[in-house]
Each structure stands twice: as C-alpha cells, then as structure tokens.
Image: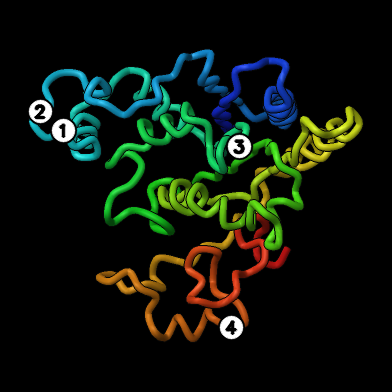
C-alpha cells in the first residue's frame, strides 16, 4: 500500500495550548500508522492573511479593477502565484487527508486560517464553475475541522443561546471544503477545554487519539449530490425534492423549509 500523506494546517500561536496538544497527538498517531505528516504552522510561518495583488508575480491583467479570482486564475495558469501560495498548493495536492486545527474565533476560523483558504484555494487550482461540490477537484481527498470552543457544548445546541453547531459548521464545511470537492469527515470538537479540569482535558485528548487510529477509514458527512440540482437554476430538481424531503430537509443548509436533519454537519448518515 502506498504511504498516506497527511497535511495539518495549524492555526494557534502558543505551543502550550490545547490546540498544540491536539496537533501533536495527530502527528504522533498518524506517523505511527505509517503516514507521512506535514504541518503548516501558520503563525510560525507568519502566513499572510490578506488576498491582494502582491500574491501575483509580474503584471496583473487589469490594475484599474483588480479582481482576485480572475487574476489568480491567470497567474496559476502561468505559474506566477507567489511562492508561499504555490508551496501550500503543493502540500494540498499531495495530501490524502487534511486536518485543520484551530480555536474557534467568533463562530469561525481565525483570520490567518481564513487567509489560507482565501489565498490557497484559487480559482482553477481548487475549483471551477464546472468542478465544485460533489464534482469538485478535491473529491479524492478527505478533510476535517478539529477545533476548540470557548463555549460549553450545551450553548451550541438547538436550544442553546449560540444556536445549533450544525448551522455554524455549514459555511465552513459546505461553503469551503465541500465546495472544493473534499470528502468532509465529522468535525473533532473539543468543547471548552479551558474550563475543563486537567482530567477532562486528558479525556478529550484520549478520545482524539482513539479516533485518529481509524480516521482514514471514516465515512464522510452527507451533502446533496450536484446532479440532484438543475444545472441552470441550481435548485433541487422537483423529483429530488420529493425523493429527499421527508420528515427533515436533506441538509443543514438545503433544508427545503423542513426541520434540519439532526447532526447533519456533525455525524455521517447512519451513525
């Protein structure tokens, strides 16, 4: 069997953090499973977070009205993207599995990781109009979000003040990862480790260690396949509305006005 390659995109500046411990656990376990593991430590790399014209070497096509997606597509075609982007794209292309390890900031990823998504997932390289969602470029690659929260789990429940975590996850998991075709594995959520007793934190890491053993064999989360939608309006085809809308809508985002399917963004179907 060919060696599996894992990329960990890590976004925390402190080596003493719980995020650092979770990242180290992943490196250790996956290496012991004969995976090769590469870590992009974004803060240590001083990774640039802003998507700007500086990401392109040489002339831009339209300096009066700079359009990032179009200009980076052209630069990617011609091998003129900046070296830091090209290097991350290489790592991503080689990976069988990508783990994003971060603390949840304001219900989303920290700015440096958002900048990684904005700058690395360029048009042409990571998606095109034709190749996205279930037809996406990265459909052979698995990806998962592994993150810590400041709030307790109950606060992110359907009756909690923060709202349903499945709703919070939709823009990240559907709008970024699945958009580029990734098979999205269930997120690894470490609920409020800062509030936990030391044994609580140890138990969280032990559960992650156990999960890591079989991570590469996990089934991905369910997203409605691209061919269920009309190719012009991108609406669910009427026959598919009937097929996939029962007691619940199909997914947390495409819910057809029905109750959200429980844990659609947190557990694969049938689990």
* Location of mark 1 (residue): 66
- Examine the rendering and report whether any part of residue 245 can be seen: yes
What residue appears at the point 64 percent right and 38 percent down from the top-left corner? Answer: 146
Q: Going 57% across and 26% down the picture, which residue do you hit? A: 10
Quadrant of res 211: top right
Local secondary structure at mark 4: loop
How many other residues sit within 10 Å of disc 1, few (<14), some (14-19) or many (≥20)? few
Classify the position of the C terminus by image quarter.
bottom right
Residue at left offset 66%, top offset 61%: 263
Residue 59 position within the rendered picture, expressed as x and y whole percent measured from the top left = 11, 22
**Residue 205: quadrant of the picture:** top right
The kind of secondary structure element at disc 2 is loop
Of the numbered discs in the image, which one, if any, rests on residue 181? none
Q: Position of residue 154 (x, y in %)?
A: 76, 52
- Secondary structure at badge 3 equals loop
Q: Is residue 227 above or below residue 20?
A: below
Q: Secondary structure at mark 1?
A: loop
Tell me the CA gap for discs 3 and 4.
33 Å
Return the disc, 2 or 3, that comes first in the chain's sequence: 2
State yes or no: discs 1 and 2 in contact (Cβ < 8 Å). Answer: yes
Q: Quadrant of the N terminus?
A: top right
Marked residue nearer the N-terminal end (4 or 1): 1
Disc nearer the start of the sequence (3/4): 3
Look at the image and tell me whether residue 32 can be seen.
no
Residue at the front extreme, as displayed? 161
Query: Horizontally, is 27 left or right of 139 in the view?
Result: right
Q: Which residue is mark 3?
A: 104
């Amino acid at each position: 069997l060919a060696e599996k390659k894992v990329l960990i995109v890590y976004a925390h500046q402190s080596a003493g953090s719980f995020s650092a411990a979770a990242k180290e656990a992943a490196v250790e376990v996956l290496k012991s499973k004969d995976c090769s593991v590469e870590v992009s430590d974004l803060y240590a790399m001083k990774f640039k977070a802003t998507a700007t014209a500086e990401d392109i070497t040489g002339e831009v096509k339209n300096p009066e009205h700079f359009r990032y997606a179009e200009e980076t597509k052209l630069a990617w075609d011609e091998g003129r993207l900046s070296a830091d982007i090209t290097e991350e794209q290489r790592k991503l292309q080689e990976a069988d599995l990508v783990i994003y390890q971060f603390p949840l900031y304001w219900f989303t990823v920290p700015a440096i990781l958002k900048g990684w998504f904005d700058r690395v997932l360029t048009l042409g390289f990571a998606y095109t109009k034709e190749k996205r969602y279930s037809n996406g470029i990265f459909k052979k690659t698995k990806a998962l979000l592994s993150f810590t929260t400041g709030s307790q789990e109950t606060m992110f429940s359907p009756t909690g003040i923060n709202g349903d975590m499945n709703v919070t996850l939709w823009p990240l998991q559907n709008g970024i990862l699945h958009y580029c075709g990734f098979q999205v594995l269930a997120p690894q959520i470490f609920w409020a480790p800062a509030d936990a007793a030391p044994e609580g934190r140890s138990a969280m890491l032990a559960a992650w260690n156990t999960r890591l053993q079989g991570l590469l064999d996990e089934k991905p989360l369910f997203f409605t396949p691209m061919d269920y939608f009309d190719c012009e309006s991108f609406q669910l085809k009427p026959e598919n509305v009937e097929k996939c809308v029962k007691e619940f809508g199909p997914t947390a985002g495409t819910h057809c006005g029905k109750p959200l399917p429980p844990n659609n963004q947190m557990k694969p179907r049938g689990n």
